[in-house]
Amino acid sequence: MLLAQLEAFSEVARLGNVSRAADTLSVTQPALTARLQGLERELGVDLFVRGARGMTLTDAGRALLPYAQRAIAQVLEGQKAVDDLRLGKVGQLFIAAAPAVSTYVLPALLKAFQTTHPNVRMGVRTGHTEEVLEMVLRREVDLGVGRPIQHQDAELIPVFDDELVLVVSRHHPFARRDRIRLQELADDRLILFDRASSYYELTSSLIRQAGVVPESVIEMDNVEAAKKMVIEGLGVALLPRMALLAELRTRLLRPVRVVGAPPVRRPIVAIRRTDAGTPMGPVADFLALLRRSRAAG
Amino acid sequence: MLLAQLEAFSEVARLGNVSRAADTLSVTQPALTARLQGLERELGVDLFVRGARGMTLTDAGRALLPYAQRAIAQVLEGQKAVDDLRLGKVGQLFIAAAPAVSTYVLPALLKAFQTTHPNVRMGVRTGHTEEVLEMVLRREVDLGVGRPIQHQDAELIPVFDDELVLVVSRHHPFARRDRIRLQELADDRLILFDRASSYYELTSSLIRQAGVVPESVIEMDNVEAAKKMVIEGLGVALLPRMALLAELRTRLLRPVRVVGAPPVRRPIVAIRRTDAGTPMGPVADFLALLRRSRAAG
DNA sequence: TAGGTGCGATCAATTGTGCTTATGATGGCG
DNA sequence: CGCCATCATAAGCACAATTGATCGCACCTA
């Protein structure tokens, strides 16, 4: 049985007239006649009584009509559902993100996303990149955001590069200088954050590489606390730029260029299950927003 | 969009495998692949992620699946509904019938019909043939049964011939004779029934035709009373055979052949709206039962 | 009652479209 | 490293749907 036959049947039943139904369906009248005959042949019953004044439903036709209409309605609704999804109008967007992303990048992005996609259900979960990957693989979220991490079933999509920035308080001597040498850090107190973060290892190796042994080191367990320490003048810190946007803008913290040390850049990637296919709808839209934002400046 | 595409989609989604779905749908695998590609092209989205281990639904596929399944289910249910109707399993059978039919023919027939068609809703309305016609034309009933009556929108289907039978009580002198002459009726009392019935006019004209003036006439307003009168020996009557079946069988009443007068036969017809088409399902089955019954024979 | 009108069915030719068989490409698994 | 399973592609074919023109019929109108 063909959907076209059901549409023909439904429309002819509605109009009681093959010729006019042919117009509204944009086919010729003989084509419609053939569809109806085909349907009647397949079902083994007459659906219409042919009169000189048009077509009238038989009992069988009356019995079939509601089913035909519902079937057609389901198809249309299905098309609409897919279309809405494709255009990102509806659907869901659950994201797993590394702490810095979750804290400093997502809020603004999701606020913007919410205004353009009011009917999309959103959610955020936070974890280190390994946990993000796990959540993606277990399909607990539609998208992960974190540092690159290889896995057979995961696909990585670069979204922006983050960067470690050396920051000092506004009263610190470095604040007045364009750039400093790495060795000068030896005279200062270095503030480290979150031993579990991937940045911890980076920072440490950078320092060690330069043969610098800082006078003293303070370890914090989160970025926010580390920033406070720096602002209070207790030391200097290498912090991800995406966590500093507000303080750099208000000049509460001052960035300092370090000569002789290459800028430490870390790609931030989106993580998708390979078998989820090309991102679509809300996920695709959010990915575009994420890349466009260039969140790290 | 083709129904076949939705079926392909649904089945592949269920099995996660084009080749196996091709088996269950009894087509070749390339045919299914083409259907899926056509559907994806038309919707503008990928419905599956192709892997070496089979097909996995995308978000769009997951969104579409329930609609596709419901559409297919509606089509199947529609087919079943038409089929049940065609086979007379379900539906309704509302009949309007002339009083004699309603009283003496329908009860036994409807009892038989009920056992073979337990899920058919049935109903009977009684009226003279003109009223039966009206009910048919107003679609208050599916079928009328009565004497022939012409109308542009009504189709008449002969079902059996009724016959006026001269009956007398078992003690009446005629009861011992094979046949009588019409003129002999002049010596007897004639019992007429129901002035509104079409039989009244028939009977009267038959008598007048023969130039017979019965000694006396008693008019009753229903057949049952007329029968009682005859049984009590108060006179003789010309009554429709279909109203006499029980009394003739028990020999409470005796039929008498009248020589010189042709048997008075009246066709009983079923009445259908022309625009209702060929009878189907319960109506067709009942019509067949009605003709087979030869109720007046 | 003769001609006009509207409607559905039919016909012949053409176009399309899906189906089948055979083959290719790719990834996983022993 | 070759084999197996899986899906995609290609070529040829057959059937079916579409089209435009025509027919037949019933009804309406003059």
Image (cartoon, coloured by chain):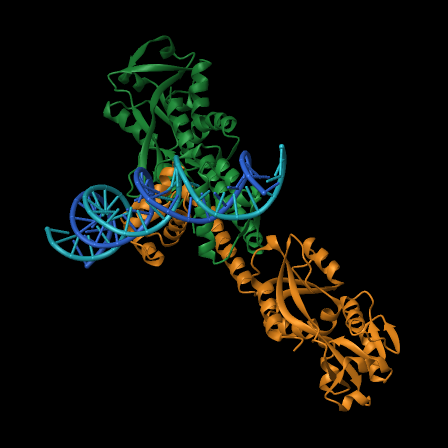
Chain colours: A green, B orange, C blue, D cyan
Quadrant of the image occupied by residue A188:
top left
Q: Residue A149: name its quadrant.
A: top left
B219 displayed left or right of C22: right
| Residue plotted at (40% across, 13% down) | A172
Residue at (51% x, 55% y) in the render: A46
How far across and down, in percent of the image, does residue B152 sit? Answer: 65, 52
Asked if residue B159 shows in the view, the reply is yes
Most foreground residue, B21 or B206? B206
> Residue A41 or A259: which is nearer the viewer?
A41
Q: Name the image quarter holding the C terminus of chain A.
A: top left
Closer to the camera in the image, C5 or A266: C5
Residue B22 is situated, as x and y percent measured from the top left of the image, at: 32, 54
In the image, B26: left or right of B268? left
Indicate whether A191 appears above or below B59.
above
Tell me: A277 left or right of B267: left
Residue farthest toward the front in the current orientation of the protein: B211
Q: Position of residue B111 (x, y in %)?
A: 66, 74
Question: Can the viewer see residue A122?
Answer: no
